[in-house]
Image: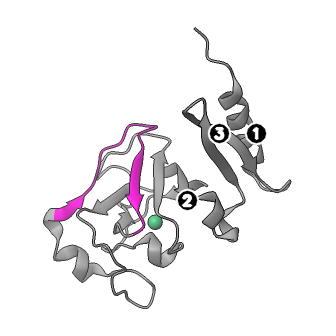
Amino acid sequence: MARHGIDRHLGVGAHQDAKVVAPDIPFSIWIPFHDVTPGQNSGLGFVVQPPDFILPTLPHNDVGSDYVLSRLEKVWLPTYRAGDMTIHTKYSPHFTTGYGTLSDRYSLEIRAMPRDSAPSDHLDPALYIGRRNGVPTITGTGCLPDTAARGFLASSARLAKKPESR
Ligand SMILES: [Fe+2]
């Protein structure tokens, strides 16, 4: 899913996708569409060395500032170039950084999961990946006619089918 956000001041906290997205999606890929410099514009930060279970949370499903502040040496605020890719597992505590610059944040999040166990509410829009001659490639798309991502999916699938120029 493509996202647009505004960089606003945010409190300290983090969440695990296993708690707030779906427990059966193993990992997510996050890609910013512009450069991200900590302190200057918002991006995605992490608390590294994640647990392998769902942490206790506050009522709004955040692991809370105490968790993050007690592990400050494990907090990682990457510098990103546009198009850089990060992957976080469903147990990886992560957070959107916020500095109050009011700058725009554009990004793409891809939630990767096996097709046969994908939760039905995560299938629109969807890109299906399989191997063609041993090479991972887009083998199909799933998107209802009025879903905004339809054009993006169609062009991605077209690009994936293009023969390589040699
Ligand atoms: Fe998340």
Image quarter where the C terminus lies is top right
The kind of residue on which mark 3 rests is Ile
Identify the coloring: one colour
Q: Is mark 2 within 8 Å of ligand 1?
A: no
The residues bearing labels 3 and 1 have C-alpha atoms spaced at a distance of 11 Å
Residue 137 can be seen, yes or no: yes
Which mark sits nearer the N-terminus, 2 or 1? 2
Residue 96, given in percent of the width and then of the height, sits at 40, 63
User: Which residue range is magenta in the image?
Assistant: 74-90
Task: Say which quarter of the image contains residue 152.
Answer: top right
| Residue denoted by label 3 | 138
Q: State which mark lies toward you, 2 or 1.
A: 2
Location of residue 134 by image quarter = top right
Q: What amino acid type is highlighted by mark number 1? A: Ala
Q: What's the distance in space between the residues labelled 2 and 3, CA to CA?
A: 14 Å
Label 1: element kind: helix
Above or below 157: residue 28: below
Disc 2: which residue: 113
Q: Residues within 10 Å of mark 3 (few under 14, many from 20)?
A: some
Up/down of 62 relative to 121, above or below: below
The residue sitting at the bottom extreme is: 59
